[in-house]
């Protein structure tokens, strides 16, 4: 250990500082660490037994390690063992200092543990590197990232001299150690840890055409095995790579977690040229570089998030195999990239998350659109040294047909661009929609009681939570009437169906929060606290798991393999899918997405109050959602995806500055999402898959709520539909009438007054209620549901120019008029939508409002209803409203000057 300490000292870095970096507190100082590594190597320290894994870890642990106080002993032990310390040393250290990386490393490095020798070091693949490996590296010569290329070429070409090949291509030093050790069976006479390779000394490393040969698939598989431990490429990866081999542009549309990154990583490994990846988020780039470093592939990211200004220069000299860069930076780097294409070669431009290109996508980034610059500047016409244009590979998991077309057009991708499309169907995801008051903490109990219960059973709670949570939930149920928390099966008493709005009350919110257990916890829950906490707890490995279960089946292929439904399956074919779905859901992490930063804090606070380990992740923007979305079920296991939606409220756009076009698009997307929530009869997976333009066939996912619960009973709403159309068409006639010169002197004023404004749905509903006793008690949201159904059938349309989420100014169409005038006896059977069901929940026994209305005529039903309404709990006492002006005048005894004066006057009288 003395040698290590000396080396650290010689390198000019204080030991505590190293620890700071190891613990992630100085996450941006990778290069200083690399300097340390270099010095340690130069100083022959490795042969003295300093664990290579520790060095390796130093450079990336800033991303991976949890901070002290946030981890269990097990986690600390596991990580330290992974770093190369031996088992007993680690256990002893953790026993002595508790579950703290910092203290445990301190303990070990201070020599408190004598036995620490570090002679056997585990590699990331679980293999061991012996002492030989370290002594070999110590001689310090040239590093060779392109040994892979050698490997590829071995069969086809005479071996090139090492200096020819990669003498100057150094990798992200420390991180590449394991792969170097594995690749070279001979002593590492060529390893160079110098970071200062001069661009001028760079030879043209690879001729334009790398002879990869026809057996490329075999070569790729061997690389896959070597670097990533996978046995073969997935079909869509093969397709994308064969397009790249053919120098074609390619658009890859594959589900999240399916393995798109490999499509652009392999070209770098195969050719030794650079792959430039355009990515929208620093955090994504960071994660990917880190993952690649674990697999022994050199990568860096450029842009505002890169703290080391020298990285850009190094990248432009060809010192990294994969360069992640944000679109804004690409625009600035065109010339250096052209030079790079000449000196080292650019194998591919990959544009990841390419839906950002499109205004019609869900996260438009204007500079992404300007990536057409790549096509324009990296083609064989402009760069004479190129034989072929540098291919562009665009990748995304979410692109509708419209977005796809926009991508191809705006990136100027070539006409023969290959489109590689996998199914959007994720058979292990169970979709469902639940009604919730969403952002009100008063609804948390209802929404999260199962979740809390699950984690309590799992034991993933603090002691306090374990003992008290059920009681707490019960206690809260008891006071639900006074604080307005509804039980799981009831509609909240303060839920105002008539307005179609929730009666939210800040006092209720506050009182609920006060009632949440563990009130002292409040002090800790500052935004800063949570963000720091999250920085520590969330590293990519916590959330990501390899996508073992992504099968890429289209729905049809899936049905053929597993069966889709009992009805469609041949009788001799066991319905494997049903069996799979009946298996219990494995407990794992839960991610709750909410639209505001404030709410992440509220929910985290609420859950932690019950002892559930929860943290808020606030990255301020949709981007964070983006990064985390689609994480569910990446391991192939069953996962629930529950949308909590306020089904009684038409959603509005989040305030944002948008162009007119973008606003329209945002409305369209909101409307699609709204309708997804309101749907009660169609398989949810089908809606989602078809949204992306894929045919789902007639199968069902069998796992979403609509498949499992079945659709609601159909209702014959002919009477309601007809009166609705009548009222609207009457207005249409009246308004035409008003446009003319008709004036009988009696009606015109009244009509004018009534129809001065364009009548909206709400007004039509009130006219219906006025006209018919039967519909007196109907809710606006019920009619909103009916309006949607009628709109889908083409009977009405929106009369306003604007794009809408929910029809607001209905107009009757020709088809609607035909329906209205039809004398046929046909019924109008429809599945009521979620909002309609919600509004009729109280009177379930009636299949429609016409029956509900009829009920009043029956003396017994009337008696029961009245009785029920008398027995109903009184609404929660609200805070008295502030007195209004008029009330002061009406109360001469009040304490106002005017009141006292009028009291005086009246006394005088
Ligand atoms: N051929 C393969 N065999 C087995 N696993 C693979 C294969 N290719 C990729 N994977 C694994 O699949 C997982 C997901 O990969 P990746 O992050 O590239 O997905 P993605 O499609 O880019 O997802 P996202 O849309 O979220 O960005 C990773 O753990 C990766 O290692
Ligand atoms: Mg990806």
Image (cartoon, rainbow, N blue to C red):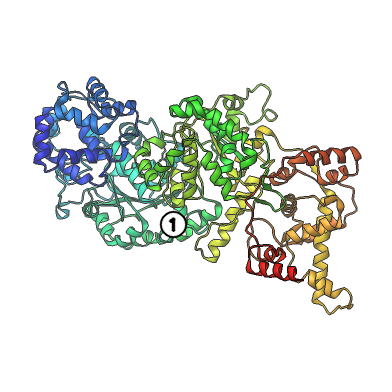
x, y percentage for residue 674? 62, 50
Residue 249, visible in the rendered structure: yes
Q: In which quarter of the image is residue 163?
A: top left
Q: Quadrant of residue 88?
A: top left
x, y percentage for residue 192? 14, 41
Q: Dividing the image into four equal quarters, which quarter contains ligand 2?
A: top left
Residue 416, visible in the rendered structure: no
The N terminus lies in which quarter of the figure? Answer: top left
Say if 440 sits above or below 86 in the image.
below
In this rendering, position of residue 167 left or right of residue 97: left
Say if 82 sits above or below 434 in the image.
above
In this rendering, position of residue 872 left or right of residue 535: right
- Name the residue located 26 percent from the left edge and 47 percent from the top edge: 28
In this rendering, position of residue 721 left or right of residue 484: right
x, y percentage for residue 154? 24, 36
- Name the residue located 62 percent from the left edge and 25 percent from the top edge: 575
For this rendering, which residue is in front, 315 or 223?
315
The residue wearing badge 1 is: 414
* Disc 1 crowd, CA 10 A, few/some/many (<14, 14-19, 20+): some
């Amino acid at each position: 250990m003395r040698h290590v300490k000396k080396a650290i000292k010689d390198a000019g870095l204080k030991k505590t500082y190293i620890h700071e970096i190891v613990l992630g507190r100085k996450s941006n100082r990778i290069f200083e660490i690399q300097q340390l590594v270099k010095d340690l190597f130069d100083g022959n320290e490795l042969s003295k037994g300093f664990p290579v894994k520790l060095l390796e870890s130093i450079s990336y642990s800033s991303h991976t390690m949890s901070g002290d106080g946030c981890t269990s002993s097990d986690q600390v032990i596991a990580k330290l063992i992974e770093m190369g310390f031996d088992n007993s040393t680690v256990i002893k250290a953790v026993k002595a200092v508790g579950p703290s990386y910092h203290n445990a490393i301190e303990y070990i490095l201070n020599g408190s543990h004598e036995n620490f020798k570090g002679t056997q070091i585990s590699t990331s693949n679980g293999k061991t590197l012996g002492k030989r490996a370290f002594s070999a590296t110590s001689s310090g010569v040239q590093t060779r990232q392109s040994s892979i290329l050698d490997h590829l070429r071995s069969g086809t070409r005479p071996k090139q001299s090492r200096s020819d090949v990669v003498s100057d291509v150094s990798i992200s030093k420390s991180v590449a150690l394991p792969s170097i050790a594995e690749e070279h069976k001979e002593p590492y006479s060529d390893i160079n840890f110098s970071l200062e390779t001069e661009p001028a000394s760079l030879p043209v490393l690879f001729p334009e055409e790398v002879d990869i040969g026809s057996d490329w698939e075999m070569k790729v598989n061997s690389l896959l095995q070597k670097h990533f431990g996978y046995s073969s490429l997935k079909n869509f990866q093969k397709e994308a790579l064969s397009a790249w081999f053919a120098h074609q542009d390619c658009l890859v549309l594959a589900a999240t977690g399916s393995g798109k990154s490999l499509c652009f990583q392999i070209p770098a490994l195969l050719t030794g040229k650079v792959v430039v990846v355009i990515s929208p988020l620093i955090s994504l780039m960071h994660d990917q570089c880190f993952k690649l470093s674990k697999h022994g592939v050199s990568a860096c990211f450029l842009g505002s998030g890169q703290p080391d200004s020298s990285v850009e220069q190094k990248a432009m000299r060809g010192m990294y195999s994969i360069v992640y860069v944000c679109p804004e930076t690409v625009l600035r780097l065109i010339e250096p990239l052209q030079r790079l294409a000449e000196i080292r070669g650019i194998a591919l431009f990959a544009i990841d998350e390419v839906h950002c290109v499109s205004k019609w996508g869900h996260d438009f980034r204007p500079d992404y659109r300007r990536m057409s610059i790549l096509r324009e500047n990296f083609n064989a016409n402009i760069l004479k040294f190129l034989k072929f244009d540098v291919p562009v590979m665009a990748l995304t998991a979410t692109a509708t047909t419209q977005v796809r077309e926009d991508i191809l057009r705006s990136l100027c991708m070539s006409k023969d661009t290959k489109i590689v499309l996998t199914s959007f169907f994720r058979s292990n995801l169970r979709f469902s929609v639940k009604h919730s008051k969403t952002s009100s903490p008063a609804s948390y109990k209802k929404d999260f009681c199962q979740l809390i219960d699950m984690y309590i059973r799992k034991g993933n709670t603090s002691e306090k939570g374990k003992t008290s949570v059920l009681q707490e939930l019960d206690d809260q149920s008891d006071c639900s009437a006074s604080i307005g928390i509804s039980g799981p099966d009831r509609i909240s008493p303060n839920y105002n169906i008539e307005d179609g709005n929730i009666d939210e009350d800040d006092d209720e919110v506050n009182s609920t929060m006060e009632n949440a257990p563990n009130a002292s916890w409040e002090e800790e829950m500052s935004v800063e606290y949570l963000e720091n906490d999250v920085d520590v707890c969330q590293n990519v490995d916590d959330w990501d798991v390899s996508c073992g279960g992504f099968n890429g089946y289209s729905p049809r292929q899936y049905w053929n393999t597993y069966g889709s439904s009992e009805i469609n399956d041949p009788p001799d074919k066991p319905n494997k899918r049903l069996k799979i779905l009946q298996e219990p859901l494995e407990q794992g992490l839960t991610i709750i997405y909410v639209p505001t930063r404030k709410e992440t804090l509220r929910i985290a606070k609420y859950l932690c109050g019950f002892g559930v380990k929860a943290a808020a992740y606030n990255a301020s923007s949709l981007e964070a959602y983006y990064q985390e979305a689609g994480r569910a079920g990446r391991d192939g296991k069953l996962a629930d995806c529950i949308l909590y939606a306020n089904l009684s409220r038409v959603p509005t756009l989040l305030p944002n500055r948008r162009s007119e076009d973008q606003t329209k698009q945002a409305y369209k997307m909101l409307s699609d999402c709204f309708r997804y929530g309101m749907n009660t009869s169609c398989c949810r997976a089908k809606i989602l898959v078809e949204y992306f333009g894929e045919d789902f066939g007639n199968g069902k996912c069998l796992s979403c709520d609509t498949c499992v619960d079945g659709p609601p009973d159909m209702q014959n709403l002919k009477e309601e539909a007809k009166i609705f159309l009548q009222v609207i068409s009457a207005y249409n006639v009246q308004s035409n009438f008003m446009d003319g010169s008709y004036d009988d002197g009696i009606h015109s004023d009244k009509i004018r007054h009534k129809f001065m404004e364009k009548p909206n749905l709400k007004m039509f509903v009130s006219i219906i209620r006025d006209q018919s006793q039967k519909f007196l008690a109907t809710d606006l949201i019920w009619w909103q549901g009916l309006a949607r159904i009628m709109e889908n059938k083409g009977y009405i349309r929106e009369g306003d120019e604007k794009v809408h989420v929910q029809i607001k100014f209905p107009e009757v169409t020709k088809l609607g008029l035909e329906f209205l005038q039809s004398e046929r006896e046909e019924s109008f059977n429809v599945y009521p939508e979620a909002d309609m069901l919600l509004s009729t929940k109280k009177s379930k026994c009636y299949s429609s409002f016409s029956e509900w209305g009829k009920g009043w005529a029956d003396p017994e039903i009337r008696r029961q209803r009245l009785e029920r309404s008398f027995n109903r709990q009184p609404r929660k006492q609200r805070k008295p409203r502030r007195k209004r002006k008029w009330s002061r005048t009406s109360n001469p005894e009040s304490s106002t000057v005017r009141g006292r004066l009028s009291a005086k006057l009246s006394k005088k009288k």
